[in-house]
């Protein structure tokens, strides 16, 4: 809570636990390997145009170029409104906007793997 209170500059927080993500060790079974490159934004740019949440997770294992993990697009948050044109009203899940591989944001800003150690807290918007 302390970190999120500091980010929002308040102790009055509204929190939710919406999902859990877990990936199996694909080195043991190649069929478990996740298809990479399914870029998306977990906020709806039409219904919530001012980005109203910050997400976070605690890693259970090390995440690096050999294991994979969260990939972010640095600086893309400054161009959030550009995602409005690709969000289909009523077609997307409430807080999910898929970003195609050929979207200009992915050409303008290079996606980057978040490398972290087991037990670290990663926060992002």
Image: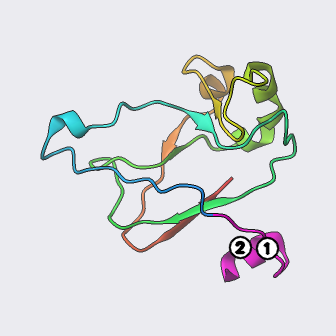
Give the residue at the far front of this rendering: 90
- Residue at x 33%, y 36% (from the top left corner): 34
**Image coords of residue 99 (percent x, y):** 62, 26
Q: Earlier in the sequence, mark 1 or mark 2?
A: 2
Q: Is residue 29 above or below residue 46?
A: below
Label ID, residue 13: 1
Closer mark to the observer between disc 1 and disc 2: 1
- Residue at x 17%, y 36% (from the top left corner): 30
Q: Is residue 113 above or below residue 85?
A: below
**Image coords of residue 107 (percent x, y):** 61, 23
Along the viewing direction, whichever of 71 and 54 lies nearer the viewer: 54
Along the viewing direction, whichever of 29 and 66 lies nearer the viewer: 29
Q: Is residue 61 above or below residue 31?
A: below
Question: Magenta span covers which residues?
Answer: 1-16
What residue would you read off at disc 2? 4
Q: Give the distance between the C-alpha atoms of the residues marked 1 and 2, in whole angstroms.
A: 8 Å
- Residue at x 84%, y 42% (from the top left corner): 48
Left or right of 86 on screen, residue 61:
left
Callout 1 crowding tier (Cα within 10 Å): few <14, some 14–19, many ≥20: few
**Image coords of residue 102 (percent x, y):** 58, 16
Q: Secondary structure at mark 1?
A: loop
């Amino acid at each position: 809570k302390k970190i999120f209170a500091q980010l929002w500059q308040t102790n009055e927080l509204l929190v939710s636990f919406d999902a859990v993500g877990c990936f199996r060790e694909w080195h043991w079974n190649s069929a478990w390997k996740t298809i990479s490159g399914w870029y998306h934004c977990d906020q709806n740019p039409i219904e919530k145009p001012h980005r109203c949440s910050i997400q976070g997770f605690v890693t259970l294992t090390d995440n690096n170029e050999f294991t994979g993990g969260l990939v972010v697009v640095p600086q893309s948050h400054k161009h959030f409104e550009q995602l409005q044109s690709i969000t289909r009203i009523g077609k997307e899940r409430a807080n999910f906007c898929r970003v195609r591989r050929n979207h200009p944001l992915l050409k303008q800003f290079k996606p980057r793997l978040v490398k972290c150690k087991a037990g670290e807290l990663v926060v992002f918007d």
